Amino acid sequence: MITRREFLKFTSVAGAGMLFPGAIKLASAMGVPELAASPVLPKYVDALPIPGVQQPSGTFNGLPLYTVTMRPCQQKVHRDVPVTNFWGFNGVTPASSFDVNTGEPMYVKWVNGLPTTHLFSASIDHTLPGMAGQPEVRATVHTHGAEVPFTSDGVFTSNGGFSTLLPGQSATYFYPNIQRGATIWFHDHAVGIDRLNVMAGLAGFFIIRDPVEKALNLPSGAFEIPIVIQDREVDAGAQLVYPTVGDNPGVHPQWVPEFFGDTAVVNGKVNPFLSVEPRKYRFRFLNGSNARFYTLRLSSTQSFFQIGTDGGLLPAPVEMKHLTIAPGERADCIVDFAPVKGAQVILNNSAPAPFPGGGGGVPIPDIMMFKVNKPLSAPDTSSLPDTLRPVYDIPEGSSLMVRNIVMQEIEGPGGPLNMFLNGKGMMQPPTEFPQLGNTEIWQFINTTVDTHPMHIHLVQFRLLDRRPFDVAQFNLTGNIVYTGPPTGPDANEKGWKDTVQVPPGQVGRFIMKWVSFLGEYVYHCHILEHEENDMMRPYTTTPTVYYFAEGSCRPNFTPYLTFNNPGDHVAGCVITYMLGNGQTKVQNLAVPAGNRLTIAVKDFLGEADDAAHDFSAKVECTNNQQVVVERSMYFNYNGVWTGGHCVVGALMPQQQWFFAEGNCRPNYDAYLTIQNPGNTSSKVQVIYMLGNGSTKTQKLTVPAHSRSTIKVKDFLGEGDDNAHDFSAQVTTTDGTSIVCERPMYFNYKGQWTGGHCVVGAVGPAPTWYFAEGTCRPDYDSFICIQNPGPADAKVTVTYMLGDGTTKAQDLTVAKHSRSTIVVRDLLGTGNDAAHDFSATVACNNGQNIVVERPMYFNFNATGWTGGSCVMGSVLPDKAWHFAEGCVRPNFQSFITILNPDPGNDAAVKITYMTAAGTTQVQMLTVPKASRFTVNVRDVLGSSDDLAHDFSAKVETTNSVEIVVERPMYFNYNNAWSGGHCTVGFSY
Ligand code: C2O
Ligand code: CU
Ligand code: CU
């Protein structure tokens, strides 16, 4: 067992000794050399410096280019001391801030203009991971919280090495700025040495602004100030000091497990003051310290309001009396000085160091002072709104994978050795390979006695909860035995985070959706001394893999796989077909860059009326490119019901799948198709939740590498009553994983024949979003709600109509049951935009549901009859992709967009990529809480050629999140009429 005493590090013994006399003895006993205390300096005599703003130096690839050189500089940290040597970006620390807008990409050329001798030469420890044989001075710049390609993330290079700039070298990084407005920051990230490079001054703010935030009228201009707090220690000559002898010098001669300075340095000054007017200010706080946490309070005892987290605005301001901020975290806060006119308000800190155990660093009770001594220059017209912007929850039920990350501190006989994540460090190859588009839960299991701020590059994630567990038990058995209930995020953590505190003896659960970029990134503890030895791990984002349970090459069925490659490189793909007879066939293809490609599956598998011509498919990219894949199928079911359906593949085999819709009434044939891509057979159980409140269970075995088809009527029988409406939960009972779809064929009301198909939902969720829906004549829209849980679900459906108005409907869905809403009953019928709708279906009593939207139609009374159905989407997002789309003469394609944000219009850009290799862009605005319909023919026209087969990317350029579907109607081969609808894929 490690005890705190064994693991403590006292970097500032003299100072600590004054307050904790016992500490001196302990430190001496450990043989730790003592840093002299910083000179005692009067507080609040220097004005708080306000970082300047970086200006572009030119352009590169047609975009703004900034040139920033790291070089030595000298700054005065206090009135009463001589200048201090620092390293600064363009010779300033903290650096001038980047101040940029969402949707405005840019480049930065980072130049290493540093000398070849380090400012902390004697503190460099060549025994740390990655340090062997390295030159003394290296630097690389990471922008913390930025969604950037990995080659611009500052850690890895494209050839697998670590990013490193030696003195004289430079690198140009791309910043797409595709994320929400947020306070992010940049700092050195050179492996094995960043704790010293950051200590030397290599850090600054990177502020991204978006129109949503700009519309809020928050305090701005002179009343918006970034504040970085860092603890430092200086010698009698005012030079920075850092320990030069390690805690366990026999193993790591220089490394100390935590640095705690004795002096607060704020924006580069020791305990500065800021003269303020009696009005509201916006302070963007950053804890830029190596290891010290701060619990901040205002000495006036007044409240302040936190409005933003690491990744952007909170849904609403949170009233705070105190704020605990860990290294790497940011807190965007509003302080109103109007009530304390004339006062001197000290920003106090009460956080122990180390956190939360204490006993290791000199307390720093005073950070800075606000002197409310300036006259009001003009009335304060800024606002602190009641709500800020929607922050959509990532539902736990959408997670495809849970990863455990065990946090350990390893103690040797002579002192601390290192710290690990899952027993590994930075130099071991990655063990986490998240796929783009997938949602995952990472459980950080803290077996140590410290709180560690865990940071993940690339993504902004959400904290689900923290929960205490029995550490001794875990160390012995590897089992997590919880010792108390979970605690949800604090009110000021209910936003997008990239760094979260995981307290000792607790499991912190983070949920994230992997998006945007393929490549090599890292996650780590943001206590820099921990990160460097060796609480940092590489991880790799990988291309999406698509699974299709359904597919048939029997006569009267024509399946296609449609590929979109939105990237710049040709994508090599492999399709593995798992046939109904147990055989497997493999097809290779190449999808050109920025293009779409259609595979007619019958060209490869042939046609015949046997199980060997039913297939499931798995589609993967073999050369690390990202593609989007859909499967469309056109049919004349039983030679009588014509139509088509289309889905984006499932992302990962799972142990359970949910379907809200399904029925065994006359004129409906529902199936469940189950793909088992695994190496062993799979025992499967289907629980049907019937419309009459009862349940029935069916069991089957699906062979390895194969697919099985259930015709549900064979089990439930047929009947024209609610006992023959069903929802289904398909579960494996032996731990294997499967993929499941539900095709349905029908003759709706004896008039409109067709079929539709959906991929199951991987889990229930509180809220579901639908972009498409209409109550025009000749369209019947339904909303089917499954409640698989043990308690009744209270549900509100909000319809956002095409005329900009909104209507709501409440209902209760009984436990283990399903309900069907006939949308027309509420919205009526009309041939106008007021009868087109988008919908959100939200459960408001803590239950989770599954929701689908079936629609039946006679398209524009053309006689193209059919039906479509989609599983709702659970998370509005900023970019949606469609592989399929066609505006040839017998095809109509639409893009329907829901903007669920009640306060902000969405600026939308649609990029059409045609099979002819051409690209076309459309810009439009979707008003707040509304829906918008694009008729793609209005943009691409129509004719019978490759230029009229398209893929599409639909993205917002102003950070408002949307949901997008693509309805299509057709008369396939002039013979099989119908329609289908597909929810886009977001990654
Ligand atoms: Cu703030 Cu990996 O960094
Ligand atoms: Cu980072
Ligand atoms: Cu740590």
Image (cartoon, rainbow, N blue to C red):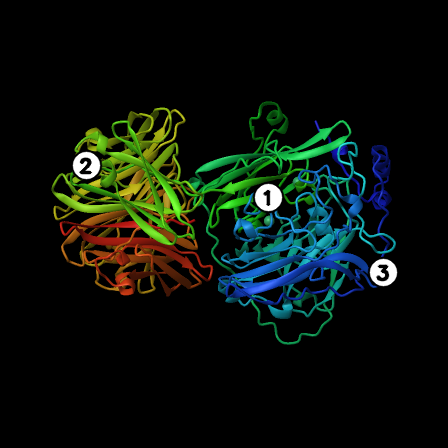
Amino acid found under the numbered disc labelled 1: Gly
Residue 94 coordinates in the image, percent (x, y): 70, 59
Amino acid found under the numbered disc labelled 2: Glu
Residue 788 coordinates in the image, percent (x, y): 35, 37
Q: Distance between the residues labelled 1 and 3?
A: 42 Å
- Describe the element under mark 2 as helix, strand or loop: loop
Disc 2 target residue: 607
Relative horizontal placement of residue 534, taking residue 462 as reference (left or right): right
Disc 1 target residue: 161
- Height in image: 461 above or below 404? below
* Residue 823 makes an appearance in the image: yes
Relative horizontal placement of residue 36, taking residue 381 as reference (left or right): right
Q: Residue shown at 62%/50% (left/top)?
A: 329
Amino acid found under the numbered disc labelled 3: Val
- Disc 2: residue Cβ within 8 A of ligand 2's nearest atom: no
Residue 335 coordinates in the image, percent (x, y): 64, 62
Quadrant of image for the N terminus: top right
